Image: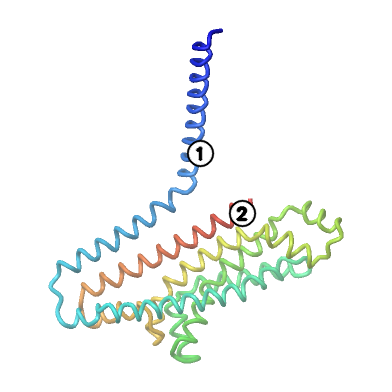
Amino acid sequence: MSTATQGTVNVQAEEAVEEVEGKQEGGRLARLWMQHYDLVILPVIILLLLLLLFLYISTRDLDTIEERVLAADNVAGLLRQHLWLAFLSTVLVLVIAVPLGIALSRRGARKAQGPVLAVGGFAQALPPFGVLLLMAFWLDFGVTTAVIGLTLAALLPVLRNTVIGLQQVDQSLIEAARGMGMSARQTLFRVEIPLAVPVIVAGLRVALVLNVGTATLASYIGAGGLGELVQQALRLNRINVLLVAGGIIAALALLIDWLAGVVERVVVSRSG
């Protein structure tokens, strides 16, 4: 074979390899897009929502009351209060629901699973607004009562997912860990909980979104938050304020859901 022919064959081989690698790369990108396209689309939806809200408000002739209510410092302060309420209640949900779920998943406590989950389901089915008002009259108006109410409203998803996640761990893996000499405690923390984390995180994602939405009602018991904007809009009969409040609350809930979704995908990929 001549040198020129050999060179042509090498070039064709390189082109074929590059074509195959390009197809493989395209296939990987396509698979990634199919698996995670929602994590790209959701931020775009949030930005479009905020942009439309800004364009709408910028074209309105706001009166002095609307300008004062929608002032950046006022909205930012209420947003901080809203996030603080959601954060505190979510931390409490984790502190209560995860240990309780672990306890209920143990063999000696499995008879109590049904009653406890039934009580949790009943508590979640109650209307949050009515529960918050009743708790406020029973305890006191303010942040503490709001945090307790939000915690009760979001407790079930994390509790249920903790129980389910631990129950779904392959029994053969648990037996293998015990056969290697691990104690029940070591098996729980080194095998069962790490494998159940993706399911627990999925429940936490639901709880976060619930807390962000329900925290809007906390303003009715004097706990502040973005619900204050809704109340002011209704009291003052200002539709522009109501639209801004609804848009911000919706964007915040979508943003929290997106962030929780990112964390969930990372946890699942590492667990897998």
Which residue appears at 66% of the width and 69% of the height?
Answer: 101
Q: Which quadrant of the structure image shows residue 127? A: bottom left
Query: Tag 2: Cα neighbours inside 10 Å, few (<14), some, or many (≥20)?
Result: few
Q: Residue furthest top?
A: 1
Q: Which quadrant of the structure image shows residue 99? A: bottom right
Q: Which quadrant of the structure image shows residue 110? A: bottom right
Mark 2: secondary structure: helix
Which residue is the site of mark 2?
270
**For this view, does 106 lie left or right of residue 203?**
right
Q: CA distance from mark 1 to mark 2?
A: 18 Å
- Quadrant of the drawing holding the N terminus: top right
| Label 1 or label 2, whichever comes before in sequence order | 1
Q: What type is the residue that disc 1 sits on? A: Arg
Q: What type is the residue that disc 2 sits on? A: Arg
Q: Residue furthest front?
A: 3
Instruction: State the residue in front, 147 or 272.
Output: 272
- How far across and down, in percent of the image, does residue 167 sit? 70, 59
Which residue appears at 34% of the width and 60% of the height?
Answer: 46
Which residue is the site of mark 1?
28
Instruction: State the residue in front, 194 or 164.
Output: 194
- On screen, residue 79 above or below 12: below
- How far across and down, in percent of the image, does residue 195 sit? 68, 57
Residue 139: which disc? Answer: none
